[in-house]
Amino acid sequence: MTILPDFGLMIDTHFCTLISPIMANALLTLFYLPEHTSGTLRERVCSTLRRAIHNGALTRGQRLPSSRILAKDLGVSRVTTEAAYSQLEAEGYLQRRVGQGTFVAICIVKSPPVANVIGEPHLSLRGRQIVQTGGCRDPEHPLPFAAGSPDLRVFPLKLWKHLTAQQLRLRGETLLRYGDPQGYRPLREAIAGYVSQTRGVNCDAQQVLVLTSSQQALQLIATLLLDNGDKVWMEEPGYRGARNAFTSAGGELVPVSVDEAGMRADDKLPAPRLIYLTPSHQYPTGVALSLARRLELLALAQRHRAWIVEDDYDSEFHYDGQPMPAMQSLDRHGNVLYLGTFSKALFPSLRLAYLVVPPALVESFTTARTVYDGHSAQLMQAVTAEFILQGHFAAHIRYMRQLYSSRRDQLLAQVHEKLGHYATPQPAAGGLQLSVWLPPGQESALTQQAQRLGVITPGLAALYQTANLRRDGWLLGFSALTPGEIRAAVERLARITAR
């Protein structure tokens, strides 16, 4: 009699609750491996389960199927599986509880696998370009001063749970199906209304694509609008995630210096195919692109038949005066793609962002989106739409703006008072982080001292492409920290000694 390779798989769904733990570890082929083809049936069942416990496929406390179900799955007698379970219980591997079932009784530390040295993997040219960028990773925990994290301790979680339950009750079955690759229609309508009212963006729901992240939007833009060697104007310093996306698509980056009025275009620069901007709150310096330069860049894009990507990544959080409308509101020729995200306004794991494209690009971007991941999660789109339409989003933003503004003020005061001997903060009219300039050539040494004191200080030098323009500094995130946490972290940084 042969032990079947589909061990652990129950077709009768009435028994799924009994064996779901073992199914969760996908033990579908253990009994089909060559090392399990010798010995009696009982020995082979014992050997397989024993090995699964040793290599971590089965873990302590995990419930196994009953001896009757296991016997049926394997096509053997129940006497065989009972004998196997009894043997493993006697050895200490399993524990059998009357009326409850059979459980793994021990936890064995898994030995590290032996590495097989087979040389470097052969990647495509584009694959090598993507790997060489270093990727884009955000901190999982908002430690001081990790940049760009919202404070989730004050997020209205109870309200969010209520809206989630409401949407499941009203549209549960529909929201579990495949969705529109362009995005859930009510959310697209809510986004179009929101950016029109608050940022002056000229669009309707048909121009909005709902995506999983701003990085996905940048990757889509790079894939659809760039060919190898196309020139991409990038702010200097600028956002590495955008640099990575455009480089991985074969774009040739052209760093354009930033001053107190934003990107400073130069007639000597090569004609761009694409211009990437953070005009409302330049990343990382925090300056705003002046109206004169906005009009100049729009005219330049029209003249060269180029695209402008306006990344409005944190425009909700403007603290001093009135923010300028989105650059897209000045576009009269359909050259601007407008990008926003909910990761900072709501919470990062929501995985929702949006891209407003000119009408001529809607079909192409929607089709390309189906190649990436089909669509964003329907349920979260529906909940977010209700959160906006019922006015909760606007109220949440107002509250967070006040909270973050006070924390910005706290950090500025602390830096001036305690770090003035080596750190010079930049003006910060908005955003979730503060740029601080350091003495030339000392960023690395000061960052290492900060790390030894338990403080994360993301560097600014790496955000430059041009060596002779590079400036040392830190980008200190404050939004997820209480005033007490800010003071404590700055007091640690005050112990640093600069040359």
Image (cartoon, rainbow, N blue to C red):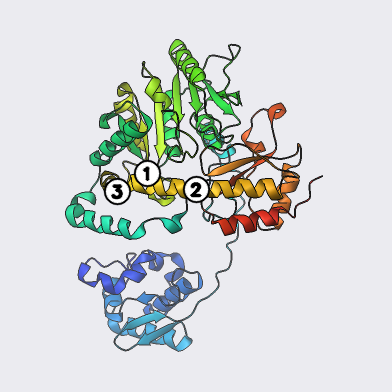
In the picture provided, is 310 more to the left or to the right than 20? right
* Residue placed most toward the observer, 470 or 37: 470
* Quarter in which the C terminus is drawn: top right
- Whether residue 448 is visible to the viewer of this picture, yes or no, is yes
Q: Is residue 327 left or right of residue 23?
A: right
Q: Residue at x 59, y 34 (%)?
A: 285
Q: Residue furthest right?
A: 499
Q: Residues within 10 Å of mark 1 (few under 14, many from 20)?
A: many
Q: Earlier in the sequence, mark 1 or mark 2?
A: 1
Q: Nearer the viewer, mark 1 or mark 3?
A: 3
Looking at the rendered structure, the secondary structure element under dot 1 is: loop
The circle on residue 493 is: none
Residue 245 at x, y = what percent? 50, 33
State if disc 3 and disc 2 touch (CB < 8 Å).
no
Mark positioned earlier in the residue sequence (1 or 3): 1
Residue plotted at (58% across, 11% down): 267
Distance (Cα) linking label 1 and label 3: 13 Å
> Circle 1 is placed at which residue position?
352
For this rendering, which residue is in front, 77 or 472?
Answer: 472
Q: Which amino acid type is shown beneath numbered disc 3?
A: Phe
Question: Gap between marks 2 and 3, in whole Å?
Answer: 21 Å
Q: Give the answer, above or below, for where 32 lies relative to 316.
A: below
Q: Is residue 184 above or below residue 300?
A: below
Along the line of sight, the residue nearer the viewer: 410 or 82:
410
Between marks 1 and 2 in the image, the one whose residue lies nearer the viewer: 2
- Name the residue that disc number 3 marks: 387
SS class of the residue under badge 3?
helix
- Give the residue number, with chain letter if any, for mark 2: 404
Q: Amino acid under label 2?
A: Tyr
